[in-house]
Image (cartoon, rainbow, N blue to C red):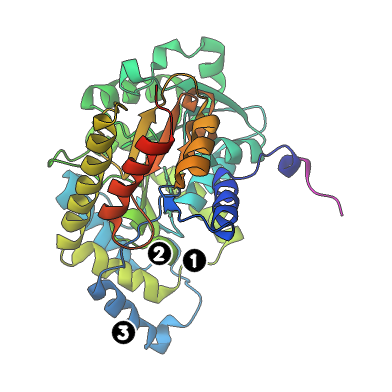
Amino acid sequence: MQVADRLLKTPPYPFAELGRLKRKAIEEGVDLIDFGIGDPDQPTSSHIVEALRKAALDPKTHQYDETGKGLPAFRHAIASWYRSRFGVDVDPDREVLRLIGAKEALAHLAWAVLNPGDIALVPDPAYPVYHVASMFAGAEVYRFPLVEEANYLPDLAAIPPDVVERAKLIYLCYPNMPTTAVATIEFYRGLVEFAQQYDILVCLDMAYSELYFNGNKPHSFLEIEGARDVAIEIHSLSKTYNMTGWRLGFAVGKPEAIDALEKLKSNVDSGVFLAIQEAGVAALTGPQDCVESMRSLYQRRRDLLVDGLAEIGWKIPMPSATCYVWAPIPAGYSSAGLAEALLRDAGVLATPGSAYGERGEGYVRFSLTVQGERQEERIVEAVRRIKENVKLS
Ligand SMILES: Cc1ncc(COP(=O)(O)O)c(C=O)c1O
């Protein structure tokens, strides 16, 4: 059978490879401490599950989702959430679209706005979907570096003029996966000017907007004057409400971008189970203490891991957001080499930074969504095993 060239040119999805390594280690009887994929280990809150149960019992939800941009109640809940969370008023009929999680929209957007010969600007390191989807759409990809010295904010002025002229889309992600950085309002002001000057659509991946610490709430780009004419923000209920498997997210922003994405999606998917959108209403409008306790949980785990590793001589900057730790690796290792040593010698699974691009070389990523039970004890155990089995200097 023939497989399309676009797939042959695509490396395996990094987390699929991680899954393979993990299965192999478990088969070999390793007592694995899993800091691999960022999949929340806590259950979805009971009031959200209950909303699904009630809605699923109503036969009216058993049909195709023919609502166009999504269930009106869900879009209104999104608009109210935007107002209370960011102080931004959005029109639920023109500026909001429900999604089957963030990932599909980040991919489909490339198909909706890029032509062959266009350039997509993609950070390095980054979530792999941005560049793979841009390539699938036939566009060229220009990767711009995110470096620690610049707090992982890009230097937009350093992108060559001939690249910027052909660029139609820039992907960004703040709070950032994998680096954990948060964007500043100053950066966002410059970004509006950049997007206006070169007529580039900004796609801001905000999957981690609610995973912040010490009350330092990340901003929406749409808070900046002029941003709603140049940007689309992609949100996910996966991490905020521990709903990864439910597949629910939403896009907010420039109406033409929302319409283009809706048109593309209406040709390739058939919406989201209406009962799940009802559960989304319960998530966004219901009690938010579940989100607060999730932040505290990740903060405790973050402190245990970062402080624990510092005590054994591995100094890592303290993340101010996301459920990850982006760890510069000790001298003498490559990212993949260290990840391998951690797995082989300590039974600890972390992702090599190089899975996110060339600039991820020199780092490994620990996800604080530790799978299994007694997670805090497991983190302490991981630090002990690393101390005893992995050479750090
Ligand atoms: C940066 C980033 N964006 C988007 C997603 C996808 O989220 P969803 O589950 O809503 O598809 C992830 C998932 O890990 C992610 O890390």
Q: Quadrant of residue 393?
A: top left
Q: Quadrant of residue 386?
A: top left
* Residue drawn at x 45%, y 64% as measured from the top left: 68
Instruction: Give the distance between the C-alpha atoms of the residues marked 2 and 1, in whole angstroms.
Output: 7 Å
Frontmost of labels 1 and 3 is 3
Horizontal side of residue 286 vs 171, given as left or right: left
Instruction: Give the distance between the C-alpha atoms of the residues marked 1 and 3, in whole angstroms.
Output: 20 Å
Residue 244 place in picture, x, y as percent: 40, 60
Q: Magenta residues, as a range?
A: 1-5
Report the amino acid beneath label 2.
Answer: Gly
N-terminal of the pair, mark 2 or mark 1, is 2
User: Which residue is labeled 2 in the image?
Assistant: 70
- What predominant SS class does the magenta segment belong to? loop
User: Which residue is labeled 1 in the image?
Assistant: 271
Q: Is residue 2 magenta?
A: yes
Q: Residues within 10 Å of mark 1 (few under 14, many from 20)?
A: many
* Residue drawn at x 19%, y 62% as measured from the top left: 290
User: Which residue is labeled 3 in the image?
Assistant: 54
**Can residue 55 be seen in this snapshot?**
yes
* Residue drawn at x 66%, y 27% as measured from the top left: 117
Report the amino acid beneath label 3.
Answer: Lys
Give the answer, above or below, for where 291 lies relative to 232. Answer: below
Q: Is residue 265 magenta?
A: no
Frontmost of labels 2 and 3 is 3
**Can residue 206 be seen in this snapshot?**
no
Instruction: Give the distance between the C-alpha atoms of the residues marked 2 and 3, in whole angstroms.
Output: 19 Å
